[in-house]
Image (spheres, rainbow, N blue to C red):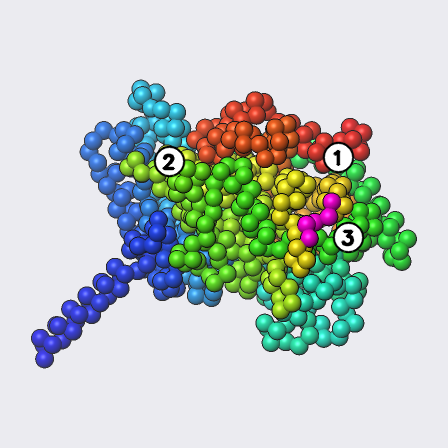
Amino acid sequence: MRKSILVAGAALLALLSSCKMENPLISESKLPFGAPQFDKIRTEHYMPAFEEAIARQKAEIDAIVANEAEPDFDNTILALENSGELLDRVSGIFFNLKEADTNDEMERIAEEVTPLLNDCSMYVRLNEGLFARIKAVYEKRESLGLGPQEMRLVEKTFDSFARNGANLSPEDKEKYSALQEELQLVQLQFGKNVLAATNAFTLNITDSTELAGLPDFVVDMGASAAAEKGQDGWVFDLSYPSYGPFMKYSSIRELRKRMYTAYNTRAMGGEFDNAANVRKIVDLRTKIANILGYETYADYALVNRMAKNTETVNSFLAELAEPSVLVAKAEVAKVYEYAVANGFDDSELRPWDFSYWSEKYKDAEYSLSDEQLKPYFRLENCIDAVLGLATRLYGITFEERKDIPGYHKDVKVFEVKDENGEHLALFYADFFPRASKRGGAWMTEFRGQKTVGGEDLRPFISIVTNFTKPTATSPSLLTHDELNTFLHEFGHALHGMLSRCTYGSQAGTNVARDFVELPSQIMENWASEPEYLNTFAKHYQTGETIPQELIDRIVASKNYLAAYYQVRQLQFGIVDMAWYTLKSLPEDIDVTAFEKKTIEPTNVIWSDPSTAFSYSFNHIFTGGYAAGYYSYKWAEVLEADAFSLFREKGIFSREAAAAFRDNILSKGSSEDEAVLYRNFRGHDPQPSALLEKLGIVQVSGK
């Protein structure tokens, strides 16, 4: 009996060991290029994989510290750079899927694993023995004969540790670690609340008269959503493909107001209230900055960006805001005049009126609407066109690989090859909204590019969007704005796919926050280029190429409400800076009142006192844009100047594309970003480049 128990016990241990060995997050993938084994990954694999990865990371750090050899670049800096490979892999998969295809169990795991990850991060960042070795290499760096990339890696590594508490006293290190752990947990809750609040609201219409003004494609979308949810009639929700068109076209003002209010009060009060989380995140970040020797979080965050300090950012925002507000007010006045002339009887436009009347005015001025354009932008054609643009500019090609699994049935996987046939990357594209995906659009990576042991490990890059899904009567048709979004995120993807760096921490999109949007925003320019649109914009039913008159209207309307939309973006940046330049935070600060007071000088339309966007502002409270939202406009200045080279050489110029690839896309952060830009363009850009591009300078007379 005892023998059988021992045998059974041994078998169980062997089974458990086998299960651990077979964990698809831990075991080496047998798929082409070592692609993630999404077809085998299950929720129960995550925690064991995290535990194993954290243990390995700590062991690798211990080995560096225990090395008795004198600290040098290879045994300290490079060893650290190459450590944590498994943890990077597991985290890259888990946290990307938590955003794109989450479930309740993944949300629970995120809460459980966050303290473990924070502990591991502190084990590395606050490790006195490790920092002593890094500091030793840093202090003798000039005598080591290092190349430029190696020198930059040494300096960036030392600076990163110093900025993450390595120079703190033992007592302050403990405080710093506790603050970081608390911050990460609060950020998780913030994002969870935004997603839950977004999914909690639906507008269910059962009376067809309440569909007044909605074009067929919006009605069809509402019918499909209702069918999916098992409801009668038509359902509209707060995902942007549903919310945006409804606000543009619904002629029933009360329904627009209801949708607007729901969207702009997400996570504001009620079950998913983020007020306390906003205050806590700002307070924790301020305390973290204080303990590191900075007066505000913005002071801390901006040191390693192109802007360098808060004064530069605030001056930059003000320089754009002053002329833009003047022009935006004139734009709003024109929309109001049009609305009144066509039956609007209120004393001023409300926010829930603006999309509706501005769309009608645009149609009257330019005879151009989403309904006219969407038939020419079938998603499949747009995919071919966006990938084809990369082929035309950079010579790279894309082949769909149905033998490589995606993480969801909607995900398409492509192999990317260089002009000479060399493998460059895997590209994952996830286009449609679902309840398990957060709103918006973004680019990310499951593995970044780096060189290890002389081998160039190529990246796994992903873009995630929320484009309109196909319906029973129509394929997925993009708005022109969605085409812009596609090109934008694909620009980020190119930054990752075309990276040619030695060190992963310098590769791809691992650049200064106010530089990272340059490759994405420059791509948007092609969306309004007739020579490009003519290559793919064909009516999904007739096959007719988009008429020249529609292209002319796209070009003519390119700067329609440019100042208004610029002011809106500037307000996001201004609120971001306002939160993160606070030196202290009263516990009872009113989030709504603070936001309203901050944006009041730049308001160009009546602001609803019952709404506020801070409660759902993922970019600055859970994403990487804290004290960094200005970078979208900063990068627009860069791209306005950069695209002028393509204007000069031709929009499909291989010469201009080669210069952009060689100096920007392939270099990551292997050199200072300002130097990279000057190498590409030969000069520093000025904000006037953007004001001129948008037509604001001429109109304002400045």
Location of residue 249 by image quarter: bottom right
The C terminus lies in which quarter of the figure?
top right
Question: What is the three-letter code of the residue carrying label 1?
Answer: Gly
Residue receiving disc 3: 359
Q: Bounds of the magenta span?
A: 544-548
Question: What is the three-letter code of the residue carrying label 3?
Answer: Glu
What residue is shown at x 88% (from left), y 49% (from top)?
Answer: 337
Residue receiving disc 2: 503
Let me know if residue 546 is in the magenta part. yes
Q: Residues within 10 Å of mark 3 (few under 14, many from 20)?
A: some
Classify 356 as above or below 601: below
Residue 157 visible (yes or no): no
**Residue 408, x across and y down, in percent:** 46, 61
Mark on residue 695?
1
SS assignment for the magenta stretch, majority: loop
Question: What is the three-letter code of the residue carrying label 2?
Answer: Tyr
Residue 317 visible (yes or no): yes
Let me know if residue 427 is in the magenta part. no
What residue is shown at x 50% (from left), y 37% (from top)?
Answer: 394
Q: Which residue appears farthest toward the top when viewing the image? A: 143
The local secondary structure at tag 3 comes to helix
Mark toward the start of the polypeptide (2 vs 1):
2
